[in-house]
Image (cartoon, rainbow, N blue to C red):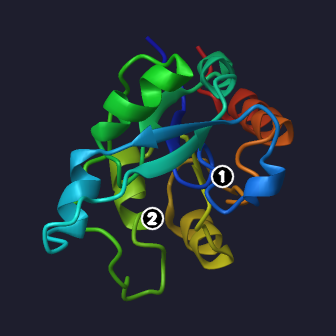
Amino acid sequence: MIERPLLFIDVDGPLNPFRSDPARRPPGYTAHTMLPDSWTAMHGDLGGRRVRPLTVLLDPAHGPKLEALPFELVWATTWEHEANEWIAPRLGLPPLPVVEWERTHFTDPAGLHWKTRALVDYAAGRPFAWIDDEITPHDHAWAQERYPGHCLLLRVAPELGLRDGDFAELREWAEDHAPVA
């Protein structure tokens, strides 16, 4: 069986345009109130005060659009397994594989995004695309120079989220770089 390219999916930014102007939310998005355990744990003890839930914007059309792409979908988010509990059902996605981070939000010695090396390791030479709002030109250059397979690092504006042009770019790239039977 031929393996499809991997698509590493970040939640906050690509799926949840958290930096959008509340008065001009991108069309199609619905606000969801969520209180994942990791969010509660991250905010620890607030002196007896309750942790405020997250407001997450999601476009339910993104689930079918992601599933229609010629990729194997993988969560690459700090939500980790909670993405399958909180995000996937609202997009109509099945549970997806998850990249589990040894640590997060650290400073990489080469100045890369903290996810870059872990995603390259996870892909293990398979073609992959990565959608995230924090990808930098340095990550692009490093991956293009050092990764033995084909890769596409697609930065998504966190005020806009995934757009039709992003889906078109992902589809075209996958069709150009998918393994041939």
Residue 106 position, x and y percent, is: 32, 79
Q: Residue at x 61, y 57 (%)?
A: 18
Residue 29 falls left or right of residue 81: right
Pointer 2 local density, CA inside 10 Å: few below 14, some 14–19, many at least 20: some
Contact, mark 1 vs mark 2 (Cβ under 8 Å): no
- Location of the N terminus by quadrant is top left
Of residues 63 and 136, which is closer to you in this image?
63
Q: Residue at x 32, y 29 (%)?
A: 85
Pointer 1 local density, CA inside 10 Å: few below 14, some 14–19, many at least 20: many
Regarding residue 10, the answer to whether it shows in the image is: no
Which label sits on residue 177? Answer: none
Residue 11 falls left or right of residue 114: right
- Location of the C terminus by quadrant is top right
Residue 115 falls left or right of residue 72: left
In this figure, which residue is indicated by the disc labeled 1? 17
What amino acid type should be assigned to the residue bearing mark 2?
A: Thr
In what element is the residue under mark 1? Answer: loop
Instruction: Say whether disc 1 or disc 2 marks the residue closer to the N-terminus.
Output: 1
In what element is the residue under mark 2? Answer: helix
Which label sits on residue 116? Answer: 2
Q: Residue at x 66, y 31 (%)?
A: 59
Mark 1 or mark 2, whichever is nearer to me: 1
Tell me if residue 80 comes above or below residue 174 in the rendering. Answer: below
Of residues 85 and 70, which is closer to you in this image?
85
